[in-house]
C-alpha cells in the first residue's frame, strides 16, 4: 500500500511536483509523424504532463512544439497560420520559428521592432520510429535520443497505435506490468471464441500460478514470470523489461519468437494518460494480420476513434460495451479487446486509485519493484543526480518467452534472447519481497 502523501508524490505530474520534475527528465511520445503529414500543414494541440502546446511542421519539414499561449498577449497559437518556416499568431501577427524565436512582428513599426528579444517556450523535439517525442526539461540535461529497438527497425517491421485512457498514468502502468492477471482477465473460455483472448492452448492455462523474479538494472528492471507446467516437466518463462519511467517490453505471444510488443503509458495530466501500443519483428516485415493490433482492441478505425482525439469506441461512458452473454459463454469479461479489458479494470479504480486499500502479494512483485524504482529516481533527481533510464542502455533490449526443461537453468536461455551481449544486472532484496503485503 501507499499512504496518501506518497501516493500524491507518485501520481501528480504537473510542473513543480516531484514526479512532474522527474518526468521532465525523459523523452515522451506524443504524436504519430503522419499527424503532421506535410510541410505547412495545420497545427495540432498537444497536452503533456498537464501543459498545453501547439505542434507544427514548418516549410522545411522541421517539427516545432511551442507553448500554446502566444508570449505577446496569450492568445492560442493553435489558431495560427503555418507559413514560410514559422507559425504566425492571428491576433497581432507575431511569428515564431520551430525554436520559439520570434522572427516577425506585423504590428510593430520597424524602428520599434524587438523580435530578437522575444521567444515562445519550445519543447525539445525528436522524431524516431514514425513518432514525434517531446522533452520538457532542462535542455542541458536532455537524455540521448529515444532509440528504442522498435524505433530502429524498417517501417514495415513494426506497427504503432495510441489510445486515450481515462485514469492516472501510474495505475495504467501498474496494470500493464502485472503479468499474473493475463490468464484470468484475458481468458477465452473456449476454442474458437468470437472475441480475442488467451486461448485454452496457451501454456499459462496449463501451469501452476507464476512466481516472479525481478532484476534491477540501470534503466529500471527486467522481470520474469516462472510457471511450472502441469502436464510436462518444464517451466514456462516470460521475460519482460520495465524501462523508466513508464515503458514495458513484453513477449509478443507464445511461439512468436523474434518479436517484441510493448506499451508506453504517457501522462497527459493527473487523471488521463496516452497509451502507446506497438509490436515489431527484428528480422522480417510484419504480416497483414500482425499489423492491426485488433486482438488488443488497439486498431485505428475499428477500436480507436482517430477523429475523436484517439479515444476508444469502448470506453467508460458506455461501460466498454460489455456483453454479458459473451461473458457467460465465450470470454472471462465479455469486453472485446485484450487491452480494452485492461483499460476497463484500471478506469474503474477511479481517476487516481486509493492505494491504502491494497493487499499486495507475491504476484505483485513487479508492481512493488516499480514503485521502489520510481521512488529511488525521485530521490536521485531531487538531489540533482541522473535517474534510472536517463541513459541509452535500453536501446537493444528485447522481450522473450519459452518452455525450458525443469532441470535446466532458464536464465541463460531467456537472457540470450533479451539482452545485448555483456549486459549485466544489479540485484536487490528490495525487489524481492519475502511475503504478502510487503510494499
Image: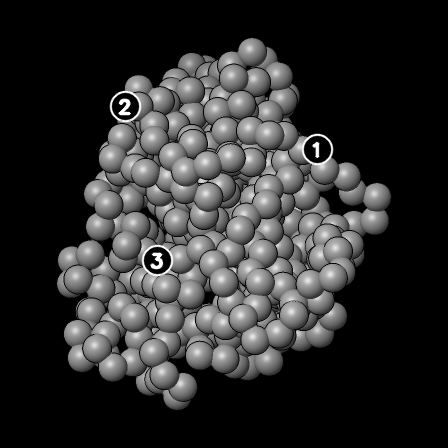
Give SS at disc 2: helix
Are dots 3 and 2 in contact, CB under 8 Å?
A: no
Residue tagged by mark 1?
426
- Identify the residue at image location x=28%, y=54%: 345
Q: Which residue is drawn at 45% across and 48% down?
A: 363
In the rendered image, the residue lying farthest to the right is 422
Q: Which image quarter: residue 45?
A: top left
Query: Neighbour class for label 1 at 10 Å: few (<14), some, many (≥20)?
Result: few
- Which numbered disc, 1 or 3, marks the residue that appears first in the sequence? 3
Q: Is residue 303 above or below residue 143?
A: below
Q: Nearer the viewer, residue 273 or 94?
A: 273
Q: Which residue is drawn at 56% across and 54% down?
A: 225
Rendering coords of residue 59 (x, y %) = 55, 50
SS at badge 3: helix
Badge 2: few (under 14), some or many (20 or more) residues near its Cα, within 10 Å?
Answer: few
Q: How far apart are marks 2 and 1 (CA)?
A: 30 Å
Query: Counting residues from the N terminus, which is met first, the one under dot 2 or under dot 1?
Result: 2
Question: Relative to residue 381, is residue 123 depicted above or below?
Answer: below
- Counting from the top left corner in percent of width and height, residue 278 is at 53, 61
Q: Where does the N terminus fall, quadrant-wise? A: top left
Characterize the local packing of mark 3: few (<14), some (14-19) or many (20 or more) Cα atoms within 10 angstroms: many
Task: Read off the residue under disc 3.
Answer: 342
Distance, label 1 to label 3, CA atoms, is 31 Å
Q: In this view, does 195 lie above or below 160?
A: below
Q: Which of marks 1 and 3 is in front?
A: 1
Q: Mark 2 points at which residue?
A: 4
Amino acid at each position: 500500500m501507499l499512504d496518501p502523501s506518497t501516493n500524491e508524490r507518485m501520481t501528480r505530474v504537473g510542473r513543480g511536483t516531484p514526479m512532474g520534475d522527474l518526468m521532465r527528465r525523459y523523452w515522451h511520445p506524443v504524436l504519430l509523424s503522419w499527424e503532421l503529414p506535410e510541410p505547412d500543414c495545420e497545427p495540432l494541440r498537444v497536452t503533456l504532463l498537464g501543459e498545453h502546446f501547439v505542434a507544427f511542421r514548418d516549410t522545411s519539414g522541421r517539427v516545432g512544439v511551442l507553448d500554446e499561449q502566444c508570449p505577446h498577449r496569450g492568445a492560442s497559437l493553435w489558431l495560427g497560420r503555418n507559413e514560410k518556416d514559422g507559425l504566425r499568431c492571428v491576433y497581432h501577427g507575431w511569428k515564431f520559428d520551430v525554436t520559439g524565436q520570434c522572427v516577425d512582428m506585423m504590428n510593430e513599426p520597424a524602428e520599434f521592432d524587438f523580435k530578437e528579444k522575444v521567444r515562445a517556450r519550445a519543447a525539445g523535439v525528436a522524431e524516431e520510429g514514425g513518432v514525434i517525442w517531446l522533452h520538457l526539461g532542462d535542455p542541458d540535461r536532455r537524455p540521448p535520443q529515444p532509440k528504442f529497438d522498435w524505433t530502429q527497425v524498417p517501417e514495415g517491421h513494426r506497427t504503432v497505435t495510441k489510445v486515450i485512457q481515462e485514469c492516472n498514468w501510474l495505475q495504467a502502468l501498474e496494470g500493464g506490468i502485472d503479468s499474473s492477471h493475463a490468464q484470468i482477465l484475458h481468458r477465452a473460455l473456449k476454442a474458437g471464441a468470437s472475441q480475442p483472448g488467451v486461448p485454452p492452448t496457451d501454456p499459462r492455462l496449463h501451469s501452476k500460478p507464476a512466481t516472479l523474479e525481478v532484476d534491477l538494472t540501470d534503466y529500471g528492471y527486467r522481470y520474469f514470470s516462472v510457471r511450472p507446467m502441469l502436464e510436462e516437466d518444464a517451466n514456462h518463462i516470460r521475460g519482460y523489461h520495465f524501462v523508466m519511467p513508464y515503458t514495458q517490453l513484453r513477449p509478443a505471444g507464445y511461439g512468436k519468437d523474434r518479436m517484441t510488443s510493448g506499451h508506453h503509458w504517457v501522462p497527459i495530466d493527473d487523471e488521463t494518460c496516452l497509451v502507446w501500443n506497438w509490436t515489431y519483428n527484428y528480422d522480417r516485415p510484419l504480416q497483414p494480420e500482425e499489423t492491426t493490433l485488433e486482438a488488443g482492441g488497439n486498431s485505428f478505425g475499428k477500436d480507436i476513434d482517430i477523429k475523436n482525439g484517439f479515444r476508444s469506441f469502448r470506453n467508460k461512458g458506455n461501460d466498454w460495451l460489455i456483453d454479458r452473454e459473451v461473458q457467460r459463454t465465450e470470454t472471462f469479461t465479455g469486453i472485446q479487446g485484450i487491452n480494452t479489458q485492461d483499460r476497463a479494470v484500471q478506469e474503474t479504480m477511479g481517476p487516481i486509485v486509493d492505494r491504502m486499500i491494497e493487499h499486495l502479494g507475491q504476484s505483485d512483485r513487479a508492481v512493488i519493484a516499480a514503485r521502489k524504482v520510481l521512488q529511488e529516481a525521485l530521490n536521485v533527481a531531487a538531489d540533482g543526480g541522473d535517474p534510472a533510464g536517463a541513459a541509452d542502455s535500453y536501446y537493444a533490449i528485447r522481450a522473450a518467452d519459452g518452455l525450458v526443461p525443469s532441470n535446466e537453468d532458464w536464465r541463460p536461455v531467456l537472457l540470450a534472447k533479451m539482452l545485448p551481449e555483456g549486459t549485466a544486472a544489479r540485484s536487490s532484496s528490495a525487489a524481492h519481497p519475502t511475503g504478502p503485503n510487503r510494499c
